[in-house]
Amino acid sequence: MAPRYALAGLLLVTLIYGCETVPTSVLLHIDAPAALQQPERLELTVFSGAGRDIAARRLPPCPAAAACPTPPRLPAKVVLYPPRAGQLRILVRSLKSDGTDVLAEGTTTLMVQAEQQVEAGVILVAGRLPDQDSDGVPDRIDNCPTQPNPDQRPCGGADAGVDGPRHDASDASPADLVSPDAPLKDKGPTPDQPPPTCTCPLGCKPGTLTCRKLIPSNGYTLPAGGYQTVSTVFMNFTLNTTTCQILSSPPFKGVIQGGACVFAVESFEINSGVTVSVQGTLPLVVLANKKVKIMGGLDVGAKGATPGPGGGVGGVPLANGRGVKGSGPGGGFVCGCGSLGTSDDCGGGGGGHGTNGGKGGPDSASCTTVSTGGPVVGVSSLTPLTAGSGGASADQMVSDPANGAGGAGGGALQISCQGGINVSGWISAGGGGGRTGAYTTTNPGGIAGGGGGSGGGILLEGQSIGGSGIVAANGGGGGGSSLSVAGACHGQGSVGQDGAASLAAAQGGAAGASGCGKGGAGGYATTASIDGEGSVNGGGGGGGAAGRVRYNWYQHAATLPLSKTSAVASTGEAKVQ
């Protein structure tokens, strides 16, 4: 165990590089993006309501004038032992070894709870953070962002604000919440009361007892009607975001805001064994005031050709046999070989999102051009919120639009909660499986497989996030190819699997028989989707890419809060003010 040491007699601090349980008040995670070089020197500054408690102390501890025998390395953990409960504002800096140049900074604000351990995280960002008054304290933790105040004493002077009820009219000094008035200024016979303690879950605004609130990502705001009260969901039902209304008595209506269907509720709970299925043309956004508990299932995924909320549809072949690209920014592509009456049957490309979609398999006998999978789209923060895209249809010689269609894209979901989010059940935004062709004795010709749809986007943010459940945005599997009686393959292929709430890939559809190509598996977690198999009589569809999952929470850390996450996943700090 790393040594513990005292800082200014106010806080005990331990720097930990391994995994260790520390029965103390604050466990601070410090990390940086992989592109940022390891720090030469790391300094910690801590402010409480009374001002600066720790000033630029080096981590790990070493003489100020000497080089540290053990240089800092990230990720790291710092354990702090504050003497009392209340708000702390923390600044971590990465500097050159001589302490002259600031290379990166990171901040966080947290509430210390009495006799409890609180976790928080600081992610270093290259360069200096905004500091409009140039006092060395970044604006996001500065109690007086427009007034130079490096010691972070109360704004407006040495003893300003309000510090509890007054007991007599002769008490001449102004009162404040942050520090009691000096004894010489208290002229009444009864001294001031101790300053009140902030008890807000997300902390208080600097210098006040006003609670800070989580600010939802993507600009969604509380509707005029405020938070509505809904009961725990005890039965399966389907929500359509196009109408943005739950058919109940009386009807429970959301509002369409910023291109999404937004529901604002006091709490949102789905009981164990119950599934809420979501469809429609718009993403779903849930703003919750108190808590979110997903004990059952919340399904915003595609089902075959039917997209999840806001997801792209898969391509459907034209009457002349030409394939059609999947819809959405990451839609899969077609090879462009097929035309009615020829034997050019290539599988459709899978939809892209967190990674590229899988390529469609070529008809290796007559058309060797490959259908490209859809590209990587969106950003890790899911701002803007992005859904999955459709897979491309097959390029084929059969004029039946029902054959070889691409799978649809998974939907988009954002849950922003002022309290905690707990998932012990599952949330899925899987892509739809690509279609296969119908094997008939009267409709001769190759029927290649459609590409799988990509997984959608799931953004969860709140005071805390946890649980033992699964959050997944797996891509759909590509469809397998079939060939009817006129060809060498006399058999029916199968459709690709839909992306499910699972830590495993959605499998591609099987080939109808020898001489046909099977579909590629969909992407999951950090595993890329698989290309469709090429064959002499028709290729399989490419697998759809995995979607994106983002976790933002107040006490942020670099590790995923739900270990059972299957998507291209990332974490961030929830925005509060």
Image (cartoon, rainbow, N blue to C red):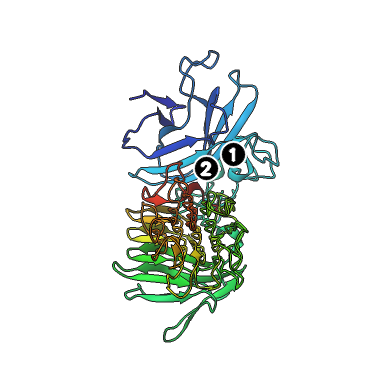
Q: Position of residue 243 (x, y in %)?
A: 54, 79
| Point 36% across, 30% down: residue | 18
561 horizontally vs 571: left or right:
left
Residue contact between numbered discs 2 and 1, judged by CB atoms under 8 Å:
no
Decide if residue 56 is in sight here: no
Image quarter in which the C terminus is found: bottom right
Residue furthest to the bottom: 249
Near-viewer residue (286 or 530): 530
Using the numbered discs, state the Cα–Cα distance from disc 2 to disc 1 in whole angstroms. 15 Å
Numbered marks: total: 2
- Residue placed under numbered mark 1 in the picture: 152
**Looking at the picture, which amino acid does disc 1 mark?**
Gln
Rendered position, 28 above or below 195: above
**Quadrant of the drawing holding the N terminus:** top left
| Residue 206 seen anywhere in this rendered image of the structure | yes
* Nearer the observer, 112 or 428: 428
The residue carrying mark 2 is 108
Q: Is residue 120 above or below residue 386?
A: above
How dense is the environment of label 2, judged by Cα within 10 Å: few (below 14), some, or many (20 and up)?
many
Left or right: 33 as drawn, with respect to 200? right
Q: How would you rate the neighbour count of disc 1 (Cα within 10 Å): few for under 14, some for 14-19, many for 20 or more?
A: many
- Mark 2 or mark 1: name the one nearer the start of the chain: 2
- The residue under label 2 is which amino acid type? Thr
Would residue 323 be found to the left or right of residue 147 on screen?
A: left
Q: Which mark is residue 164?
A: none
Task: Assign a secondary structure to mark 2.
Answer: strand
- Residue in the foreground of this view, choosing between 63 and 445: 445
Whether residue 485 is situated above or below residue 90 in the rendered picture: below
Q: Residue at x 58, y 43 (%)?
A: 141
Pair 2/1: label in front? 2
Q: Position of residue 369 (x, y in %)?
A: 59, 51
Q: Helix, strand or loop at disc 1?
A: loop
